Amino acid sequence: MGQFRRHDEEAEGRGGGLNPSGPVGVALVGHGYAGRTFHAPLIGACAALDLRTVVTRRPGDAPGLNTVATLDEALADPAVDLVVLATPNALHAPQARAALEAGKAVVVDKPFTLTTAEARALIALAEARGLLLSVFHNRRWDADFLALQADIAAGRLGRIVSFESRFDRYRPEVRDRWRERDEPGGGLWYDLGPHLIDQALVLFGRPLGVSCDLAVLRPGGQAVDYAHAVLRYDGLRVILHADMVSPAHDVRFVVQGERAAWLKSGLDVQEDQLKAGLPVGGPGWGVDPRPAVRVDGAGGDRMPAPGPPGDYRAYYDGVARALRAGSPPPVTAAEGLAVMEVLEACLESARLRVEVRLA
């Protein structure tokens, strides 16, 4: 999206505005897994943000936090400048629209929306109102992804010819939750596909075309639990894979360059640290216990390829700076739309069983 105006310039006539001397007032909508595990502690770790309100129908699940039952109540609070949506995927677009129409900045958990049409409409509204709109693509700040970016930028791998990124899990039993039901926004591709796609776009940009296979492999499954996509670039193939039926689920990245390969096992530790309730940014935060291995193409030598610790705090720190200074957010709405364009093309490819061209 284009440059947005600072909130204090728009305060008059909408019942409130950004207090230039205090933290940004935040309303978190949804206190399920994403809201409770990721957003609430990360917002709380940002000194420039003040988590004023949590919208939840189960106030007992948010001890110590001010709670309201409806989005309308949060939007009516003039001290709320930023609305963070951590609700089921199908609610993202209508709730983001309501928040923007109320004059609030918005952060939407991934996926941005269910369709590219919804994403474009939100971008147009945010630009018309001069309001921040961003998507929570937090895995740009995984330790392994930061390390991989550094190695690619430094030329240690040479030109990348194939890139495989996987999020495999072993959850053979189907659970009764919205993410695993046959309903709009359910299934693994909407859940993990945005992570995989966003990282690929950060590294390589928009692909020329996509081929995708989506399936339900678990007995009794209702929603997609297997996804395999190939993104076609000139001189490069990107493979994105996720499933719920992999007992051996330790492969994360396999990157083949003309000079060296880059191999990584295991996921970033920050999600587990957040689930365990560890202090955000405390000792050992985001440190990768199993750094990647770089394999020299000429001699086959293997060497560790460590990088900086992962740090999801960078996302909300960037949002706070954007609201204060009017600078671009850490993930722009246009970048969120680009992810949706690939995600939607993959859905069409899987439906038609053909490659869908993007350029």
Image: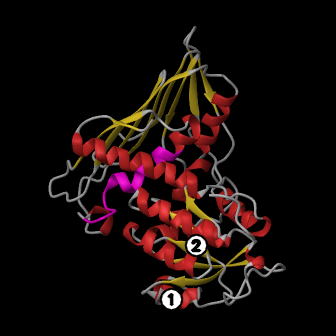
Q: Which of 44 and 20 is in front in this view?
A: 20
Would you name the residue on which mark 1 appears? Answer: 72
Could you tell which of marks 1 and 2 lies nearer the N-terminus?
2
For residue 93, above or below residue 169 = below
Amino acid beneath label 1: Asp
Quadrant including the C terminus: top left
Would you name the residue on which mark 2 appears? Answer: 40
Judge whether residue 190 is colored magenta: yes
Element at label 1 = helix
Q: Residue 11 carries which label?
A: none
Q: Nearer the viewer, residue 71 or 94?
A: 94
Q: Which picture quadrant has residue 241?
A: top left
Residue at x 65%, y 66% (from the top left corner)? 279
Element at label 2 = helix
Q: Residues within 10 Å of mark 2 (few under 14, many from 20)?
A: many
Which region is colored magenta?
Answer: 183-198
For residue 322, above or below residue 243 = below
Give the foreground label among 1 and 2: 1
In the picture, measured across the screen, residue 294 lies left or right of residue 50, that is left
Residue at x 28%, y 62% (from the top left corner)? 180
